[in-house]
Amino acid sequence: QVQLVESGGGSVQAGGSLLLSCKASIYTDSRYCMGWFRQVPGKEREGVAAIRTFAGATNYADSVKGRFTISQDYSKKTVYLRMNSLKPEDTAMYYCAAGLMPTCTVVASAPFNYWGQGTQVTVSS
């Protein structure tokens, strides 16, 4: 059974930084793609960043390129999302996800089979 547990959300002022963590039980399998998504009530879930387990290839949404960094520490079975230069529009519930797919990308959420419970990020102006 795949388990994903996020942590690290919170409230921060615009321009600040946060580090999200996701501990994932799938870090024994190099076929997985790990992704971060976010969702605001009433809006569709948006892909933020993805990373291939072990190999480390990454993919980012245009809205976060240059500000967010996804990384992994497979010895700790954890994927991270470092968020810098946060903006009020980054406010959302952030979810960690895992799935088996040939191309590791957050263009769509459907290929991700496993989801964490979410962690709230609030950015005030």
Image (tube, helix red, strand yellow):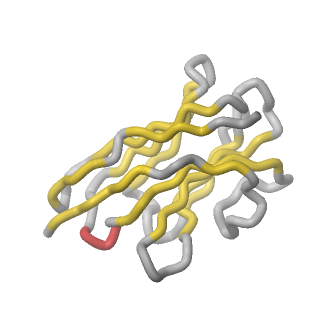
The correct choice, above or below, for 123 with respect to 16 in the image is below
Question: Residue sitting at 52 percent across and 49 percent down?
Answer: 117
Q: In front here: 3 or 101? A: 3
In the rendered image, residue 96, in percent from the top left (x then y), is placed at 56, 49
In the rendered image, residue 28, in percent from the top left (x then y), is placed at 76, 24
Q: Is residue 118 left or right of residue 52?
A: left
Which quadrant holds the C terminus?
bottom left
Total tally of numbered discs in the picture: 0
Q: In front here: 1 or 76? A: 1
The correct choice, above or below, for 66 with respect to 82 in the image is below
In the rendered image, residue 45, in percent from the top left (x then y), is placed at 55, 71
Question: Residue sitting at 55 percent across and 53 percent down?
Answer: 36
In the rendered image, residue 121, in percent from the top left (x then y), is placed at 32, 56
Residue lying farthest bottom? 42
Which quadrant holds the N terminus?
top right
**Quarter of the image where one finds residue 31:** top right
